[in-house]
Image (tube, rainbow, N blue to C red):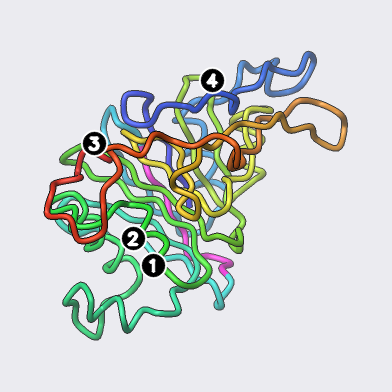
Amino acid sequence: MLAVFDPTVAKCPEGLRSPPVAGSAAAAAGGAGAGALMKGFSDSHDGAVTVSLGPSGALAYSAANQNPLVPRLFGAVNDIFCLFQGHIENIANLKQHYGLSKTANEVTILIEAYRTLRDRGPVPASQVVRDLSGKFAFILYDTLSKSTFVAADADGSIPFFWGVDSENHLVFSDDAGLLKTGCGNSYAPFPKGCFYTTSGGLQSFEHPLHEVKAVPRVDSQGQMCGSTFKVDSESKKKQDASIPRVGSAADWSNQF
């Protein structure tokens, strides 16, 4: 799966972009933009489906060569698109919680969970992701509000990466080789136990009161290559009205 988002929709966090490595193929070519990334995905994945989001970016999906234990899914409901890989173990409980039919899958559940957050916001986004039990990584895009919602499970069970291309697009994919080609050395594994939203940036759903900081990442050749992001246990966010309480009737949709 692949998502390429314009900086007006998803801003690159500090630390993810690294200076180009002198003499590297990516530096010589000036990196790859959104068009090249989408073409690269289509060329290397049989049966790829691509979806243009206009000036906001693009999505791509393929079911080819997937692991049956952690399959990829793609769906859309009411102008909300979702790419998902993995499986949710407590899916029956979530179907009941969100009032969904027995045929609902992980994509349907995530879209409904997002719609509940956006429209009613009874709990914080961190709680919604924390309530998902299983192995997963997902990318969700709301075309109406032009908002993203991206997350990976607490164990980092699914290979999942993000980076920034030469056109300053924020890129998410399960294909590390594609990001290495398209983003040069400005890519890294997406931090486990974290989620990203358009308005809130990168946050930890395991430790929502703590800040997430970038730690410089060095590859096997000693070159700077993006950053890993880790929870800063010594830095706490201010506990004020911007942090919702479970059961609150307030509208917390501005998290997106």
**Magenta run includes residue 65:** yes
Which amino acid type corresponds to the residue marked 2 in the rendered image? Val
- Taking the spot 69% from the left edge, 28% from the top edge, the residue there is 185
- Taking the spot 75% from the left edge, 25% from the top edge, the residue there is 224
Q: Position of residue 200 (x, y in %)?
A: 35, 35
N-term mark: 4 or 2: 2
Q: Nearer the viewer, mark 3 or mark 1?
A: 1
Residue that label 4 marks: 166
Q: Position of residue 27 (x, y in %)?
A: 69, 17
Region in magenta? 58-66
Mark 2 Cα shell of 10 Å, populated few (<14), some (14-19), many (≥20): some
Helix, strand or loop under label 4: loop
Give the alpha-carbon distance from disc 4 to disc 1, as whole Å.
Answer: 36 Å
Q: Nearer the viewer, mark 3 or mark 2?
A: 2
Horizontal arrangement in the rendering, residue 98 relative to residue 27 (left or right): left
Give the alpha-carbon distance from disc 4 to disc 2, as whole Å.
Answer: 33 Å
Q: Is residue 219 above or below residue 132?
A: above
Helix, strand or loop under label 2: helix
Horizontal arrangement in the rendering, residue 216 relative to residue 167 (left or right): right
Q: How many marks?
A: 4
Residue that label 1 marks: 131
Residue that label 3 marks: 146
Q: Is residue 87 above or below residue 16?
A: below
Which amino acid type corresponds to the residue marked 4 in the rendered image? Ser
Helix, strand or loop under label 1: loop
Do tag 4 and tag 3 residues touch (Cβ < 8 Å)?
A: no
Q: Which one is in front, 52 or 8?
A: 8
Give the alpha-carbon distance from disc 3 to disc 1, as whole Å.
Answer: 25 Å
